[in-house]
Image (cartoon, coloured by chain):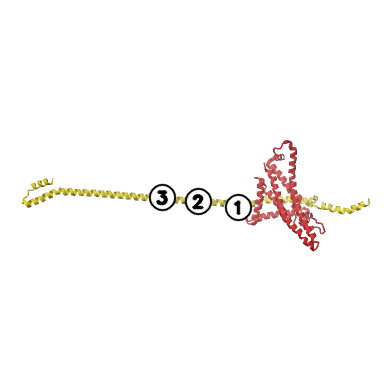
Amino acid sequence: MYRTPRLFLFAAPLAAVPGRAVAAGMPQLNFHDPLLIGQVVWGAVIFGGFYLALSRFALPRVERVLTNRRTRIQSDLDVARKAKAEADRASAELLSARHEAAEQARAHVERIQSEARASADAHAAETAKRLEAEIANAETRITQSREQALSSLSEIATSTTQDLVARLIGTQDEQTVASAVKRVSA
Amino acid sequence: MTGEASVAAGSTIDALGQFELHPVLGHLGEALRFSQSPLFMLIAVAIVLVFLYVGMRPAAVVPGRLQAAAEISYDFVHDLAVSTIGENGATFFPFVFAIFFFILAGNYLGLLPFAFTYTSHIAVTFGLAIMVFVISILASIRFQGVGFLKHFLPAGTPVWLAPLLVPIELISFLSRPVSLSIRLFANMVAGHVLLEVFAGFTIMLAGLGAFGHVLAIAPIAINIALTALELLVGVLQAYVFAILTCIYLREAVAH
């Protein structure tokens, strides 16, 4: 009975060390501390303010920058695409214009060639006609000359004969000579 | 890591002293219940907001480094929210962003010497988790009406299983804020206790003379490695908290 309290007294500090450690330990579980509940209330206020600042100002600002960049890149791409389409169209136009010009030139050349051919043909035909006409003319003239020559032949023969007869016999009978010549030449 | 100063001068290591709350600003802080925990919340929030403000101030089409960082953080959380929650993700995106960066900034701020880690307080993490829980319930009612209660009996379950399944589903539903808050709290506490313990070893070994001075290098090396680990844990826990928030919200908005 006497020893027991002393043993307790001896053991008391030993028991108290872990006991105090538990009581003092884990300040997070000391719910009697007004600061512990205070930090939750303050935390709620601060977190609420944080959330509002983020959702109202900070994050929309980031969002705006990102959206700006997206739209800018998109519009730049659109501009580039449009420029490319325009360039393509211009190049196609150029090609078609060149093609058309070549076609036109070819048609032109062909037309000129055919015109030249036609005019040459016409010229040739005209020349031929003129020549033919000249030939015909000449032929007519030749015929006329011949006929003329032929018609004057009897006259010449008659006069020559008269002259000859007159020289030979000294007399002349125009009538007889003419009939004689006519008889011979007939 | 504030506790380094409070390591008992003797042989014991007071690993939990770093989590104690002290009023700041003297009597005013005491009256307003304003401890270093809300002070560091303010600092964390201010850092995030200043980061976004200064980063986005050039509003350049071709971003600089800080703007690129701000945009990456935006895109990262935005993709997380939209890809997990679905088409309504954009509605909850600022909330998920706030959660992620509130926790991330708290975790990283706590790694600085003499700083306080508010995410190491179960009251704070449980408050965040309850907020997520309540918002997901409100979103359920908003998007599905009272019909969201039918999720407690998965489709196609025989009716006679209902008395068994409904309580299980209900318990798993109600345990969400508990697991969410304890995961973050326990990770932060464990990391900071380890840092404190090894820092305490260094001080204790340093007290052993020249031989101790050499040996004291070992806990310092471990603490460097632990700091690297804590950098990973800090972002990982913030990510886990944010993605679980997204998953709960997806369940809330899914029809």
Q: Which chain is yellow?
A: A
Distance between the Cα atoms at labels 1 and 2? 28 Å
Q: Residues at badges 3 and 1 in contact (C-beta under 8 Å)?
A: no
Q: To which chain does the residue with label 3 belong? A: A
Which quarter shows the C terminus of chain B? top right
**x and y percentages locating residue B211 in the rendered image:** 79, 62
* Label 2 sits on residue: A88
Q: What amino acid does circle 1 point to?
A: Arg
Asked whether the viewer can see residue B42, the reply is no
Q: Camera-side residue: A28 or B191?
A: B191
* Badge 3 and badge 1 both on one subunit: yes
Question: Quick check: A106 left or right of B132?
Answer: left
Check the image and name the residue furthest to the bottom.
B210
Name the residue: 56% across, 51% down: A77
* Label 3 sits on residue: A104
Q: Secondary structure at mark 1?
A: helix
Q: Secondary structure at mark 3?
A: helix
The mark nearer the N terminus, 3 or 1, is 1
Q: Residues at badges 3 and 2 in contact (C-beta under 8 Å)?
A: no
**x and y percentages locating residue B238 in the rendered image:** 71, 51
Q: Which chain is red?
A: B
Q: What amino acid does circle 3 point to?
A: Gln
Q: Nearer the viewer, mark 1 or mark 2?
A: 2
**x and y percentages locating residue B245 in the rendered image:** 70, 47
